[in-house]
Image: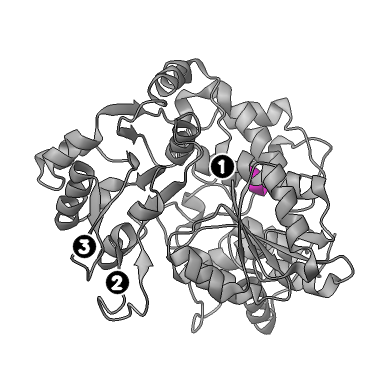
Amino acid sequence: MRLMIIGGLDGHISQAGKIALQRGAKVTHCEDIDQAIGALLNGKSADLAMVDVKQKIGDFIERLKTERIHMPVVACGVSTDARSAVKAIQEGAKEYIPLPPDAELIAAVLEAVTEENNSMIANDPSMKPIIALADKIAPSEATVMITGESGTGKEVMSRYLHNKSKRKSGPFIAVNCAAIPENLLESELFGHEKGAFTGASSRRIGKFEEAHMGTILLDEVSEMHPLLQAKFLRAIQEKEITRIGSNDSIKVDVRIIATSNRDLGASVQKGEFREDLYFRLNVVNIPLPPLRDRPSDIARLSQFFADKYAEANSIEKKIVSQAAIEKLQACAWRGNIRELENTMHRAILMSSEDEVEPDAIFIQSEGLSTSAPAQAPANAPDPAGVSSAGKTPQSPPVIQNQGSVESMIGRTIADVERDMIINTLDHCLGNRTHAANILGISIRTLRNKLNQYKEDGVDIPAASSN
């Protein structure tokens, strides 16, 4: 665990750092958010930031997003400063730690972050040979290719390999090749010098340098442009990189793990992926099965996500009922573990019984729920993002089965969107926050929609915080 402490913490900085060190964390201290961003851009990566509430936490989180730095932020401040604590959470901080620091509380936060990064639930018989293979090759220096459908847990497996390797005390750096624009990926991987291109206002250390003596994960490596593949291959072969705008080579010692949800062999045949790079990356292949082929893992995964989101939403934890588990196990899970996670997030918000009941389970990809509001087809535009301005209100046909796609034929997206929002809000007893979470939209978007419907004369469920 690498912890970055930002700010003075009202003189408690040394105490907080000492507690973290005693718990095995590597601690870096920065005076303010500018120094912290500078350190992060120059290779001082961290797994968690503890930031004084007197700092501009919202600005810091936005700058992390701009620089594509993924790191949870925890706010810290004197225990009586409730207003600052609420503001920090609203601006994106994951937690608030009151000062002076409590050893057990800091330990719990560090443990929670570590557990979330390292948790691996894999007891299904189909996973046993895969875990055995992972355990066998983890201590080696072999490059690993992890393949499987989207959402099967490829990054979790990558962290599992890292934490069982000889490099576990070094950094684990993940790069999503599909999420970074093509013209920025080279800079992200290899870094750049100041003035190397328009917008390069300062030197930036690339992910390869940042991962020195550790592991670098190249997520969805199949999305890398062929021209960049050649530079990447050289970095693997020569174990050195060159920052953009520099002529100096820099030696790097990293272990490489790559993932792909595509058939890379077919991509090689089509000329989309270099054959020599493919063989370099595919020294050991770990194929992850889809969730539908791991039925006995569904119960534990469901309970894990239910507990996680109950805690995140300050809701009392509940056991997932056997009837709900049976419903979950009957699903094909086209979105795999990621879809199950989202399903359990909604379920823990919707549940109204002592245990998570089947009616709280709405499996979006299959439309299995008969009590949930009508949903648009999976390949339709997100109705929450479609404006209904200029639409003439129409009387929709009577819906016999709200879970069926056929019931939506002849209706406008605006009508479906309106009914979905109103029905979900009604199901949540008027709780705007819960409804927005279930619908996957921001509370601001929900309020704007409700104001629009109110102007159109639609009855809106009364607001409630219960």
- The image shows residue 184 at horizontal and vertical percentages of 30, 66
Disc 3 to disc 2: CB gap under 8 Å:
no
Question: Could you tell me how far apart the alpha carbons at marks 3 and 2 are, in whole angstroms?
Answer: 11 Å
Quadrant of the image occupied by residue 101: bottom right
Question: Could you tell me how far apart the alpha carbons at marks 1 and 3 are, in whole angstroms?
Answer: 35 Å
Disc 1 to disc 3: CB gap under 8 Å:
no
- The image shows residue 375 at horizontal and vertical percentages of 54, 54
Q: Secondary structure at mark 2?
A: loop
Residue extending farthest to the right is 80
Q: Earlier in the sequence, mark 3 or mark 2?
A: 2
Under mark 1, the amino acid is Asn
Q: Nearer the viewer, residue 235 or 184?
A: 235
Highlighted range, magenta? 344-348
Question: Which residue matches tag 1?
Answer: 117
Q: Which residue is painted at 75% across and 44% down in the image?
A: 108
Question: Which residue matches tag 3?
Answer: 248
Q: Is residue 6 left or right of residue 378?
A: right
Quadrant of the image occupied by residue 327: top right
Mark toward the viewer: 1 or 3: 3
